[in-house]
């Protein structure tokens, strides 16, 4: 169980897909700690951004195999969360609290 909300929410994921989701359906994407569950993610978002969360969906991404010269390596596995806010809530600005 992770207590600090700054350790749960690592960074926003800003891509073309997440920007489109934010504009059309109000869904924001964050990189979160791998051990965090949906309830901890919801509580962290509500504490950091002072807004109400309607739904949290998570997805675990496996790291990619990379090669540098003849050496093989792997990037780290990570988890992302799609957060949908309740109707009537103010939209999250990325640089408010993170």
Image: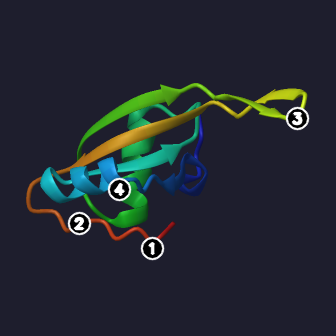
Q: In this view of the protein, which residue sits in the foreground, 60 or 35?
A: 60
Tell me if residue 7 can be seen: yes
**Relative to 46, does residue 67 appear above or below in the rendering?**
above
**Which of pointers 4 and 2 lies earlier in the amino acid sequence?**
4
* Rendered location of residue 72, percent (x, y): 84, 26
Q: CA distance from mark 3 to mark 1?
A: 38 Å
* Rendered location of residue 81, percent (x, y): 40, 40
**Which of pointers 3 and 4 lies earlier in the amino acid sequence?**
4
Tag 1 residue: 95
Q: Would residue 53 appear left or right of 64 to someone viewing this image?
A: left
Mark nearer the viewer, 4 or 1: 1
* Rendered location of residue 13, percent (x, y): 45, 52
Q: Which mark is residue 12?
A: none
Q: Residues within 10 Å of mark 3 (few under 14, many from 20)?
A: few
**Which of pointers 4 and 1 lies earlier in the amino acid sequence?**
4
Mark nearer the viewer, 3 or 1: 3
What element does badge 4 sit on? Answer: helix
Mark nearer the viewer, 4 or 2: 2
Q: CA distance from mark 4 to mark 2?
A: 12 Å
Tag 3 residue: 69
Q: Residue at x 88, y 35 (%)?
A: 69
Q: CA distance from mark 3 to mark 2?
A: 45 Å
Tag 2 residue: 91
Mark nearer the viewer, 3 or 2: 3
Q: In this view of the protein, which residue sits in the foreground, 61 or 52?
A: 61
């Amino acid at each position: 169980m992770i207590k600090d909300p700054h350790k749960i929410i690592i960074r926003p994921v800003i891509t073309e897909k997440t920007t489109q989701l934010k504009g059309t359906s109000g869904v924001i994407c964050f990189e979160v700690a791998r051990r965090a569950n949906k309830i901890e993610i919801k509580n962290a978002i509500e504490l950091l951004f002072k807004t109400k969360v309607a739904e949290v969906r998570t997805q675990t991404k496996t790291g990619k195999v990379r090669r540098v010269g003849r050496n093989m390596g792997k990037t780290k596995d990570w988890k992302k969360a799609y957060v949908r806010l309740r109707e009537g809530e103010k939209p999250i600005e990325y640089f408010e609290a993170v």
